[in-house]
Image: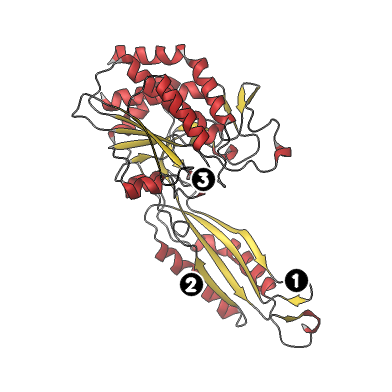
Amino acid sequence: MADYDAAALKFLHDRRDELFEFTRALVAIPSVNPPGDERAVAQAVVQRLNELGLPDVEVKAKTPERPNVFCRLRGTGGGPTLMLSGHLDTKPIGDRSRWLTDPLKPEIIDGKLYGLGVGDMKAAVAAMVYAAAALRATAAPLKGDLLLAFTADEEAGSAFGADYLVEERLARADAAILGEPCGIHREWEYLCLLSRGNCCFRIKVWGTQMHSSISDILPSVNASVKMAYVLWRMQRDLPGRIRYTPHPLCPQGVTLNVGVMVSGGVFFGVYPGYAEFACDLRTLPGMTQQGVRQDIEAFLDDLRREDPDLKAELSFEPLPLGWIEPSEMPADHPLTAALQWAAGRVFGACPPLGCIPGTTDAPKFQFGLGIPTVPAFGPGRLPLAHSPNEHIDVNSPLQAAQVYALSALKYLG
């Protein structure tokens, strides 16, 4: 297959400017979620797939404004199917005053391309399109199929994207790669095989709602003060009480974020009778929601014994936020080996195996569709995603396309 590898790399090198401008074009198309409307960016992807002569392009949507785009490059038969997948939506812009550039007018500054969603994950989408085009242009005798699946709604829960694909069984593959950003301190820092799960919950605290002028005359419990104490104790003590099995790809273990949202009280003059705070817990394989519940309830029981006036209750968010499974791609899977080989060709050495600290669509594909999924190997850095001044290196789209094309040739050939 060496000749086909070289031909694919030449195809991509010759079109590196075209790929880069396509990345910029995708960033310039708003697909902010919420509110959520991927029609314009999906149409741009469909148009480019057609211009590149890629076959079997389809759009499937649960509702018209939330399209998912598919494209299948068929092999000769008898081989596995590889799915390359990315999401078309972005987080909201946030405070525009904190951006160095217009977030929807991508600009190059000091060798970096700035723009909303450039790393999360429109550069990866563009790279996957051109990787498929490179395979088609080489006419390599691939035994298996290459399936592109570009989804809606990843940034707000995936109900119209990955969940819809699972409900309707719209994607069938033997393995998949998600182009999520895989770096923290630098781009291409890890080949992420592990995606931590997420567990979102609230701690609800009750007190005495009454006229605030008599709070020092009658017995009273300030729900906001009680809540603040529970929050502080949870921050200090609970992380060490969450049970989990350490994982070699995630040395930091689990991550508990307390007080990601806080609310309480009614108005001036009203002694607060209710307050609550929200938390998210990033989980590892082997953990269960029931196990987490037991650990938190044991912690709250200790606080109640210390303070008989404390009335606090644990409440998990409705699914999926209440429990998103962690997922893991086996290190000995043939696709892992193909990616390691391809990354070695492109970067000189493959990045070490690692973990994406956040959640991705990987568990939906892995558990919902039975597709072993690499949760993150794409351009960008996770700290820049969802942040002002999101950017990637100008070479990243080409590098991503090269990795995807070579790994597909290796895995499918």
Q: Which residue is nearer to you in this view: 215 or 283?
A: 215
- Identify the image quadrant of the N terminus: top left
Residue 351 placement (x, y as % from top left): 44, 30
Task: For the C terminus, give its image quadrant.
Answer: top left
Binning the other alpha carbons within 10 Å of mark 1 as few (below 14), some (14 to 19) or many (20 upward) gives few
Q: Position of residue 209 (x, y in %)?
A: 69, 80
Judging depth in this view, the residue of 329 and 44 nearest the camera is 44
Who's the residue at 35% across and 40% down the image? 373
Relative to residue 28, is residue 165 depicted above or below? below
Where residue 272 appears, as percent x and y from the top left, is 70, 75
Q: 302 or 346, which lies in front? A: 346
Give the residue at x 47% y 14%.
15
Residue sitting at x 81%, y 81%:
213
Q: Which mark is residue 298?
A: 2
Which residue type does callout 3 highlight? Glu
Under circle 2, the secondary element is helix
Cα separation, mark 3 vs mark 2, equals 33 Å
The relative height of residue 128 versus residue 134 in the rendered view (above or below) is below
Q: Do the residues bearing badges 2 and 1 touch, measured as CB atoms within 8 Å?
A: no
Pointer 2 or 1: first along the chain: 1
Q: Is residue 343 visible?
A: no
Seen as rendered, the residue at the extreme right is 213
Residue on which the image places disc 1: 267
* Amino acid carrying mark 1 in the image: Phe
Tell me the crowding category of disc 2: few under 14, some 14 to 19, or many 20 or more residues within 10 angstroms, Cα based.
some
Query: In 3D space, how far apart are the residues under numbered discs 2 and 1 (Cα atoms)?
Result: 33 Å
Q: Amino acid at mark 2?
A: Ala
Q: Which residue is mark 3?
A: 155
